[in-house]
Amino acid sequence: MKVRRVAVTGLGALTPIGNTVDEFWNNLIAGKSGSAPITKFDTTLFKTNFACELKNFDLEDYFDKKTIRKNDPFTLYALIASREAMKDAAFNTEVLDNNKCGVIWASGNGGITTFESEMLEYAASEIGPRFSPFFIPKILSDSPSGAIALEHTFRGINYCTVSACASGTSAVMDAFNYIKWGKAKVMIAGGSEAPITQAAIGGFNAMKALSTRNDDPSTASRPFDQERDGFVMGEGAGALILEDWDHAVARGAKIYAEVVGAGMSNDAYHSTATHPEGLGARLAIEMALEDAEISADKIDYVNMHATSTPVGDLSELHALKSLVGNGKTLQVSATKSMTGHLLGAAGAIEAVATVKAMVESTVPPTINTKNVDEALPEGIDLTLGKAVKKEMNYAMSNTFGFGGHNAIALFKKV
């Protein structure tokens, strides 16, 4: 079987610091925080009253009221990001073989906004159960992949990946593999999440996973800082168009980067906590390097998972030790310091950020981190406070999730 090369030919983003790829990227390199007080519900009784919400955003600018009523926000976010990516890829849809085009889309929570609102309405009702006829399709995690395929008439491979906060990278990895194996020519891969709800904020508060820095929300996400106290919830979507390399070249496509490797593993350690030594994460990194047939010293930049939790950040640092050595400094950054944590969509928007970093030869900063954890290994540069120019040939995006899931995507500059 011939192994196919895989190109990235389109990008889309809807994030707390930008509603398009360009706006997202410009605010990333400017070091802008997306964290602010929650506007979606009354947070008076909650331990955390801030999050990274979408800004200057109205669904009615993108959809008619009927479409909004029939879909949960996480599906609508997916449609917005995938539309941008498809437009960016600039296909001639009249000659595209839709039987060879597919969608793999991720979400860790599905339609949690709809589920919460329907159950609250039911609990308040005095006349028995009255649910929307759209209730079930709106909450299904695979609703975005179906909706995107319907919009573009893509009849190929189609499903949803769910691996908690590693879901977005899992989607990119699977799309990469299907093209590599010759099972598809074009794939829309990405993830979306709309988790800023009472149940999600309250639930993560109960786990003590969220920051409670209510007096200064814009600096609450501070990866690797000695005073970090949890992650900041985010919402939005990211999309990438992955394409068979020869197919892309034949149509004269703009190629951002090549996907050259991916790895996935499990900690097999705890239902929510990462392995303290980062064993599972390290295994996934080694798998991605083996897939790409390169050595660890070839990695020029890592977009870290780095959620700003006390335990999770440390385990990732342990995992990265395998990439450090021979006097080389490894450039890394934690873009969640700006976007917050988009859960199942995190890997998608961070893959977009990683590809843009390579294209622009610029490493986004890690903001808010003032007192770096003493456990930081020598040879790792966190890119604190300010973006830096750097030529990159290989860049990696890390994501880890509850259940012990670890997923790594590895890109090469064109």
Image (cartoon, grey):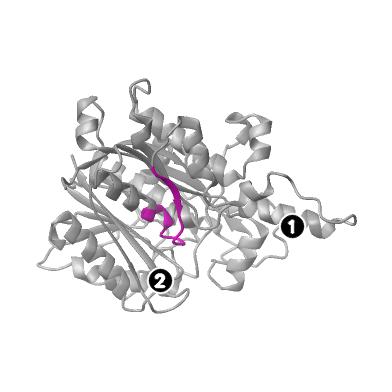
Residue reaching furthest to the right? 126
Secondary element under disc 2, as helix, strand or loop, is loop
Q: Which residue is drawn at 82% across and 55% down?
A: 129
Q: Does the magenta stretch include residue 293?
A: no
Q: Residue at x 50, y 58 (%)?
A: 108
Res 84 → quadrant? top left
Visible residue check, residue 383: no
Res 216 → quadrant? bottom right
Q: Is residue 232 left or right of residue 59?
A: left
Q: In this view, does 137 lie to the left or right of 291?
A: right
Q: Residue at x 64, y 56 (%)?
A: 197
Q: Which amino acid does label 1 sit on?
A: Met
On screen, 263 above or below 353?
below
**Residue 391 position within the rendered picture, expressed as x and y whole percent measured from the top left:** 18, 45
Which of the two discs, 2 and 1, labels the residue nearer the N terminus? 1
Numbered badge on residue 404: 2
Numbered badge on residue 119: 1
**Residue 10 position within the rendered picture, expressed as x and y whole percent measured from the top left:** 34, 35
Residue reaching furthest to the left? 326
Q: Which amino acid does label 2 sit on?
A: Gly
Numbered badge on residue 153: none
**Residue 64 position within the rendered picture, expressed as x and y whole percent measured from the top left:** 64, 29
Visible residue check, residue 273: yes
What span is colored magenta in the figure? 157-170
For the residues marked 2 and 1, what is the alpha-carbon distance in whole angstroms?
30 Å
Res 334 → quadrant? bottom left
Secondary element under disc 1, as helix, strand or loop, is helix
